[in-house]
Image (spheres, rainbow, N blue to C red):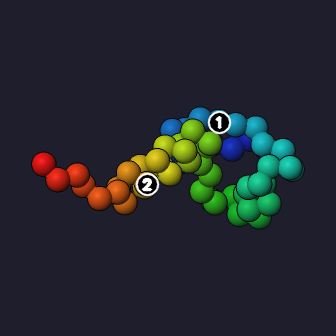
Amino acid sequence: MEVKCTFCGRKEEITKVHKDYRKLARDKNAVYTCETCRARLRYQALQAQKAEKPL
């Protein structure tokens, strides 16, 4: 199945062993994010949770 990343638009081919395959097969409008965007989002969320350093 060919899917498109919601954030960057990269197209990827996923197989039945992919963790998001069932979700995407059931719902064609489901949101898919590639590994690169998922890692970027995770990093940004961790950085936003850190306390700011005092000057």
Q: Position of residue 14 (x, y in %)?
A: 78, 43
- Asked if 9 appears above or below 23 in the picture, the reply is above
Of pointers 2 and 1, the one earlier in the residue sequence? 1
Helix, strand, or loop for circle 1? strand
How crowded pointer 1 is (Cα within 10 Å; few <14, some 14-19, many 20+) is rated as few
Badges 2 and 1: C-beta atoms under 8 Å apart? no
Choose top left, top right, bottom left or bottom right for residue 52.
bottom left
| Left/right of residue 51 with respect to residue 3 in the rendered view | left
Q: Position of residue 7 (x, y in %)?
A: 50, 45
How crowded pointer 2 is (Cα within 10 Å; few <14, some 14-19, many 20+) is rated as few
Q: Which residue is mark 2?
A: 46
Residue type, numbered disc 2: Leu
Quadrant position of the N terminus in the picture? top right
Image label count: 2
| Left/right of residue 40 with respect to residue 22 in the rendered view | left
Q: Position of residue 54 (x, y in %)?
A: 17, 53
Residue at image x 80%, y 49%? 18
Residue at the front extreme, as displayed: 54
Residue type, numbered disc 1: Lys
Residue at image x 55%, y 45%? 39
Choose top left, top right, bottom left or bottom right for residue 30.
bottom right
Q: Gap in Å between the C-alphas at discs 2 and 1?
A: 27 Å
Q: Which residue is mark 1?
A: 11
Q: Position of residue 50 (x, y in %)?
A: 35, 57
Choose top left, top right, bottom left or bottom right for residue 23.
bottom right
Residue at the left extreme, as displayed: 55
| Left/right of residue 22 with respect to residue 7 in the rendered view | right
